[in-house]
Amino acid sequence: MSHPATEKTFALPSEMTILHAALLRESLLQAVSEGVSAWDGHAVESIDSSGIQVLLALRRSLQAQQVGWSLCDPSGALLDALRLYGLADLAQSPQ
């Protein structure tokens, strides 16, 4: 899914693993505070359960704030990880 030009978009990093989870979390929280609601996943090359947990926490936080969520252009690695955890719907439509 592509993202509308009016949405602020954050490019997810290539590495979303336990080694980067704390920094990733801080980066995403900063992006949320700046009004980002679209998350571009095209560059994700490596993601583990920690990266998935960070994305789920992000989505929950946005939902609690009644802010939309969209995961744009997920890479093959990101889609594979989402499918592995039964979360492929995260990349399907804005929530």
Image (cartoon, rainbow, N blue to C red):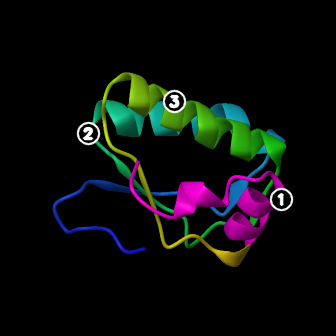
**Who's the residue at 66% across and 60% down the image?**
88
* Residue pointed to by mark 1: 84
Q: Quadrant of residue 23?
A: top right
Whether residues under marks 1 and 3 lie with C-beta atoms below 8 angstroms apart, the answer is no
Pick the front one: 88 or 76: 88
Coordinates of residue 85 in the picture (x, y in percent): 80, 51
Coordinates of residue 59 in the picture (x, y in percent): 50, 37
Mark 3 or mark 2: name the one nearer the start of the chain.
2
**89 horizontally vs 52: left or right:** left
Magenta stretch: includes residue 34: no
**56 horizontally vs 2: left or right:** right
**Who's the residue at 49% across and 39% down the image?**
28
Mark 1 or mark 3: name the one nearer the start of the chain.
3
Amino acid at circle 1: Leu
> Which range of residues does the magenta coloring cover?
77-95
**Who's the residue at 39% across and 55% down the image?**
94
Q: Is residue 58 above or below residue 91?
A: above
Q: CA distance from mark 2 to mark 1?
A: 30 Å
